[in-house]
């Protein structure tokens, strides 16, 4: 790995600290380099806070003059809640700017680079570009489509079972895999399940990491409000907000009870008795939910897949065999009749996590432009 890539990797690691915390902005990291060593660094911690470049410049002080800066995303050139970062880099006397990827925001896209170059600053873009684009995939998707970038996560046994015939699913995956899921929860804006998952598993849907973490918005799709009042999501065992997406079919009495318990209800249109998921996704996008982790169950996942709402799949494959009928298939429903009609996946990655294999892939029709 050459030095520019090494410095950009450090900027990427800084940016990842803020994943799930910056909406409606992207996660960005920056490092200032002088005489072959990093002298300052920073990242954007939350919307309304200074951008990564500003934190890095403040840390560098006068040493920024004549130095290089590595930024995962093109510096902004417009006035938002904070000032243009391109102007700050010019004023600080930065000599060269290395950029991971161009900003997909039409307000910026290329303008930051143009302003830097007009001031005589050397600019090089595309350093670790693939990783930098992956970092901001939720931001890019949200900017272009106004809906959250959605990852469907599931765990199954080697013979393709999500649970035993009795419905027992604790635990399919290893402890290391479950910790990885908690890390993922710590990095997304919202987590979603269907009411059947609430009834079967009574999950907390919180982030439980040894070093602590942040709980995302918890979303339950429950068209008729069958969520029990004594479920852990309703009892408010954490500071996490619970949003229940439902319809006018839901009993008024149950609405009042859940609201009194602290849940927020979102009344949405319905079709064939179920919440119209596209409307839910747009509402989440309107609330600046950029990244959504879909954790179950099979019926909700099938409806989301059929609606073109899933961008990425993450499957933990455990070295276990249940045998028998079990509860097979990641998605409910009939599926496609012919193999030639199967939905294609791209960019398949395989990783060992504890005893399990982690398979990750993108849904081809949902790849960002």
Image (cartoon, grey):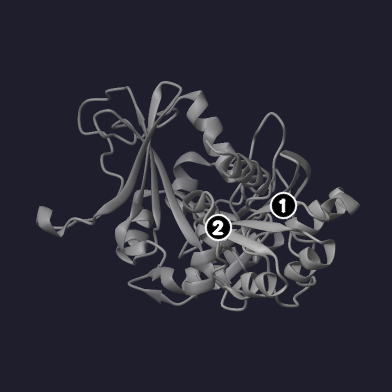
- Quick one: 34 or 18, which is closer to the camera? 34
Residue 117, compared with residue 130, is above or below; it is: below
Q: Residue at x 65, y 66 (%)?
A: 24
- Quick one: 315 or 121, which is closer to the camera? 121
Q: Residue at x 36, y 63 (%)?
A: 366
- Nearer to us of marks 2 and 1 is 1
Q: Earlier in the sequence, mark 2 or mark 1?
A: 1
What is the CA distance from the residue labelled 2 to the residue labelled 1?
23 Å
Name the residue tied to disc 1: 68
Residue 332 appears anywhere in the view: no
- The percent position of residue 82, horizontal first and vertical second, equals 79, 70
Name the residue tied to disc 2: 136
Q: Residue at x 38, y 56 (%)?
A: 300
- The percent position of residue 125, horizontal first and vertical second, equals 55, 59
Residue 34: which quarter of the image?
top right
Query: Which secondary structure, mark 2?
Result: loop
Give the side of residue 69 with respect to residue 162, left or right.
Answer: right
Residue 163: which quarter of the image?
top left
């Amino acid at each position: 790995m050459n030095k520019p890539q090494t410095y950009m990797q450090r900027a990427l690691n800084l940016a990842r600290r803020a994943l799930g915390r910056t909406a409606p902005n992207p996660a960005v990291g920056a490092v200032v380099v002088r005489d072959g060593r990093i002298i300052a660094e920073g990242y954007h911690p939350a919307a309304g806070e200074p951008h990564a470049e500003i934190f890095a410049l403040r840390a560098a002080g006068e040493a920024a003059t004549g130095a290089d800066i590595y930024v995962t995303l093109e510096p902004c050139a417009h006035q938002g809640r904070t000032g243009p970062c391109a102007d700050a880099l010019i004023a600080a006397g930065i000599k060269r700017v290395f950029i991971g990827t161009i900003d997909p925001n039409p307000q910026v896209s290329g303008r930051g680079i143009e302003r830097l170059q007009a001031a005589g600053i050397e600019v090089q873009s595309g350093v670790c570009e693939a990783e930098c684009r992956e970092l901001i995939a939720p931001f890019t998707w949200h900017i272009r489509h106004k809906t959250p970038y959605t990852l469907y996560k599931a765990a199954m046994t080697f013979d393709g079972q999500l649970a035993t015939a009795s419905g027992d699913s604790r635990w399919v995956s290893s402890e290391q895999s479950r910790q990885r899921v908690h890390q993922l929860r710590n990095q997304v804006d919202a987590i979603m399940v269907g009411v059947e998952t609430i009834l079967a598993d009574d999950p907390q849907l919180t982030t439980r990491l040894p070093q602590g973490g942040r709980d995302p918005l918890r979303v339950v799709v429950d068209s008729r409000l069958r969520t029990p009042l004594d479920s852990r999501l309703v009892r408010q065992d954490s500071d996490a907000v619970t949003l229940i997406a439902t319809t006018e079919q839901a009993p008024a009495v149950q609405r009042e009870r859940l609201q009194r318990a602290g849940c927020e209800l979102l009344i949405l249109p319905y079709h064939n008795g179920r919440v119209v998921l596209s409307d839910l996704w747009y509402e989440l996008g309107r609330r600046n939910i950029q990244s959504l982790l879909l954790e179950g169950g099979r019926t909700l996942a099938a409806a989301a897949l059929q609606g073109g709402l899933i961008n990425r799949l993450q499957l933990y494959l455990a070295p276990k065999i249940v045998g028998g009928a079990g509860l097979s298939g990641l998605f409910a429903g009939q599926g496609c009749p012919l193999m030639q009609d199967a939905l294609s996946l791209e960019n398949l990655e395989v990783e060992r996590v504890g005893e399990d294999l982690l398979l990750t892939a993108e849904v081809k029709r949902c790849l960002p432009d």
